[in-house]
Amino acid sequence: MKNFIEEFKKFIMRGNVMDLAVGVIIGGAFQAIINSLVNDVIMPLISLITGGLDFSNLFIQFSGEKYATLAEAQAAGVAVFAYGNFITAVLNFLIIAFVIFMVVKAMNKLSEVRMKEKEEEEPVTKICPFCQSEISIKATRCPHCTSVLEKEA
């Protein structure tokens, strides 16, 4: 049993497991933000555009009775097909996917800028045309073969 506990501790303390745990926690917090964005900002705008359509109350009940809201139908214990909630979940997914795409795109752009900066750095060394040794760009004489170097324009 002691070996099992030690092995479990070793597994838990590995770096990638901790990174995954942090990612899951941040993802949960991010999902709460997206849910709020969808439910509190986007859905009311869609409702305004569609003339008051409320996706959360789009449902089909499987009894002959009529209910004004999904909450009433569920409180009555009626089986319902809540397709409005599904539409909301799909919108949440699309928004999360779009936001992640934009973050990855921004990070890739930043990475490209950094790579360009590295590529555009002026060289600090050059090759001696006589002995092919690498020397300082500022050298006027090769330290290896002692050849006099012409200044490059």
Image (spheres, helix red, strand yellow):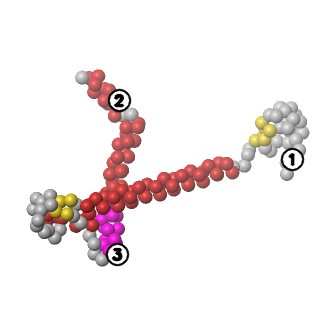
Closer mark to the observer between disc 2 and disc 3: 3
Q: Secondary structure at mark 1?
A: loop
Q: Earlier in the sequence, mark 2 or mark 3?
A: 2
Image position of 143 with respect to 105: above or below: above
Q: Which residue is at the front of the view, 126 or 75?
A: 75
Judged from this view, the residue extending furthest toward the front is 64
Residue corresponding to mark 3: 49
Tell me the amino acid under the disc marked 1. Answer: Lys
Residue at horizontal 33%, vertical 64%?
Answer: 38
Q: Give the spatial CA distance, label 2 vs label 1.
A: 61 Å
What residue do we see at 13% from left, 65% from top?
Answer: 72
Give above or below for 124 relative to 14: below
Residue at the spot 60% in from the left edge and 54% down from the top edge: 113
Residue to which mark 2 is pinned: 10
Image coordinates of residue 13 in percent, x first then y, are: 36, 34
Examine the structure image and report whether residue 46 is included in the region drawn in magenta: yes
